[in-house]
Structure formats: structure tokens, C-alpha cells
Image (tube, helix red, strand yellow):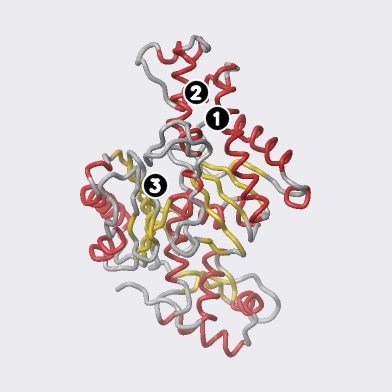
Amino acid sequence: MTCVGPENPDQARLLRLLRDDGPRSRVELGDAVGLSRTRLVAEVGRLVAQGLVETAGPAASRGGRRSSLLRVAARVRFAGIAVGPAQVDVALTDGELNVLARRREPVDVRLGPEPTLARALELLGKLRAELGVGPLTGVGVALPAPVAFREGAPVSPPALPGWHGYGVRDALAAELGCPVLVDNDANVLALGEQHTGTGRAFDDFLYLKLGTAVGCGLVLGGTLHRGATSGAGAIGHLRLADDGPRCACGENGCLEAYCSDDALVREALAAVGAGRSAALAARSAGTGTLTVADVGKAAVAGDAAAQALIRDAARRLGRVLVGLVNFVNPGIVIIGGAASGVGPTMLAEIRSVVYRRSPPLATGSLPIVLSDLDDSAAMVGAARLISDNVFAAP
């Protein structure tokens, strides 16, 4: 049977401390949450009875009788599902959001939500069988799409044709019998950064997601900010020019149409066609096409055309970030999702634009960095998404 969750704010705080910081003694927990010994013993006892907390061995001695460490119980298991434009990624985590097992396979999301989610459920079932995991405590889902968070459904998603309005949350919850939450991938990645990445040290930060789509996750005051209708951070479709390139959303001149992986490949092929890059031409000779990885490799090798098109995209990203930085005043900007070889060139140009065009008060001590997390960030973020809900006070 699925764990029930905390009964009050004190229990919720205890659970989140154990999730975020790992096993602690009763004394350490009491000091951290400011509870009296009597109240702490009572709340911990209730959490143990619910199967949410368990003993994890002896604590370090502080004089007198040695106490035991407490941790999130082993029966607490979360799952993360990340749907990409061409693949589905599934993982199981423990209560501290450590990834225990993971599987990823290519899928054709254009076939619709039912076959894609059926494949995700199949992969999840295999992971549960391998680890002997019974009922799940909760499941978080990341979609490459705008998501109506309250409804758990994508809204007019360019990357997911045929998915508009489909109740992903309700469909998965019915199959798995546990709480499910769905959000867009930029928000989920921001949560991954908050839990185990550079963002852990900041209450206010922006996570800029690059790749097949461009988006932004905003963590403000330690909490993910979604806005009134879950539309916060949707910067990929800010229009930069009325006569710009066609975007996947159907409009012209969107930021994403200049700065996504597809946009970089489009510009690279144009450079080949114009005879501006022998390196890119050599990489496209066999197939007649290119990948964003090809562009990154050419840039690292010193190809001027590849470097120029990356810097051009970065300048546009930088101009959008100037507005965000001045409006939000984050403690750090974290950039993730850039293909290998693309990130460093892009980062240097973005920094140049933001620092040059922003007032000192907003950027005097503002780091702009590349994410140091690997591609498991979405799995951790998805587990963080649902655990925040499960470990919340009723």
C-alpha cells in the first residue's frame, strides 16, 4: 500500500530534511526544526508507524548514551519519467532521490500519448521487477511541452503532436495507484538542479534549458515558480523578429527558432551550402545532413563558421536573459542542455552580453554557469517534483 504522507507541518519538515540531507540523529533533527524533545519523539514515532521513517544504525557519540540515526524508509520509492522528442527515460529512486536503476529507449512520440506512456510503464515495470520494488510512493513526469500543472496535461505542444489536453497525470495514476505529477522539462530540470546541483546553494536562480527546445525554470524564494496558469518561464516563444525563421509553434522569429538544436543545424547546413565551412561540409559529406554534435565538434576544432553561428544564437539568448536578470534578480543563472562542444562558446557570449547590458546591481556578483549535472538531472528532478508533493503537510 502506498505511504500516506505527513500529517502536519512538523512531520513534513522532518521528512524533507531527511530527504535532502540524508540520515540524521534525533538530536540533529530536533536542532534543525526547533522541536522539543517530547514533540520530536512523538512526531518521529508517528512517521515510523506510517512506514515513512526508519532507523539507519547508530549515530556518532555526543557524550552519554549513543542515539540512532533516522532516514527515509526503504519502502519509500519514487519514479521519474522523462518524455523526450524521440525517447522515453525512466528511473527509480530511493527516498533521498538517489537513482537506483534507469532505462531509456527510443520512442516515436508522434504516435500519441497512449503508446508512449504504455512503453514508459513497461520500462518502469521491468525496473520494479529487477529491484523487487512493490507499490510506488509517487511518480514525477517531465514533458517537452507546456503543461497545465493543475490538470496534469500538455497544452498545444509543438514537440508532441496529438497530445494536447491528454490527461497524462490521471492516466498514469490510474495504472500505478499512486500520486503522479506532470510538469514541463525546464521546471523539472530546475528541480534537479535545486536538489543535487549548483542551484542547491541558492534560493533564487534561473535554469536556462537548451536543446531541442528552449525554456526556463525559475526557482524563487526556494520554490519553483509556475505562475498563475503554469506558463512562467516559457521564453522559447518570445518573438525576436517578425520576419525571422519559422518556429515549430507556427510563428516566425521565436527565440527557439534561432537557438534550438534544430536552428543550429539549419544554420550549419546554410554555411555548408554557402561554402563557408570546409569542416562542416566534410562532416555532412556522407549523409547530406548534420547533427548539433557535429556543429559542436567543428567549433571545438576551431571552425570559424561553427563558432560564429553558436555565438550568434548565444547573443540572442543573452539579450533575453538581460531582461530576465534585471526583472527577477536571481542569485545565479544555470545553463543546461547544450550539446557537447556548444556550451563553452555559448556561455562566453551569453556572459558578455548579460554583463555588458545589465546594471551592476543586478550582475555585480551574478555567476552564469553551465550545469555540472549529467543527464540524470531530469530523473532526480521528476522525483523531487513528486516528493515535494508527497512530503508536504496536508
> Crowdedness of circle 1 by 10 Å Cα count: few (<14), some, many (20+)?
many
In terms of depth relative to the viewer, which is nearer, 61 or 169? 169
Q: Name the residue under label 1.
A: 342
> What secondary structure is marked by label 2?
helix
User: Is 273 left, or right, of 33 in this rendering?
Assistant: left
Q: What's under tag 2, amino acid-wise?
A: Val
Q: Percent x, y for residue 84?
A: 36, 43
Q: Percent x, y for residue 24?
A: 58, 70
Q: What's under tag 3, amino acid-wise?
A: Pro
> Crowdedness of circle 2 by 10 Å Cα count: few (<14), some, many (20+)?
many
Image quadrant holding the C terminus, namely bottom left
Ranked by sequence position, the earlier of labels 3 and 1 is 3
Q: Based on the displayed image, in which of its 4 quarters is residue 342 positioned?
A: top right
Q: Distance between the residues labelled 3 and 1?
A: 21 Å
Is the residue under label 2 in contact with that under label 3 (CB below 8 Å)?
no
Who's the residue at 49% across and 83% down the image? 8
User: Is 29 left, or right, of 275 in this rendering?
Assistant: right
Q: How far apart are marks 1 and 2 (CA)?
A: 8 Å
In terms of depth relative to the viewer, which is nearer, 302 or 47? 302
Give the numbered dot on residue 120. Answer: none
Is the residue under label 2 in contact with that under label 1 (CB below 8 Å)?
yes
> What secondary structure is marked by label 1?
loop
Q: What's under tag 1, amino acid-wise?
A: Val
Ranked by sequence position, the earlier of labels 3 and 2 is 3
Q: Mark 2 points at which residue?
A: 295
Q: Percent x, y for residue 268?
A: 48, 21
> Crowdedness of circle 3 by 10 Å Cα count: few (<14), some, many (20+)?
many
Q: Distance between the residues labelled 3 and 2?
A: 23 Å
Who's the residue at 47% across and 32% down the image? 243
Q: Which residue lies furthest to the front in this view?
A: 242
Who's the residue at 60% across and 46% down the image? 334
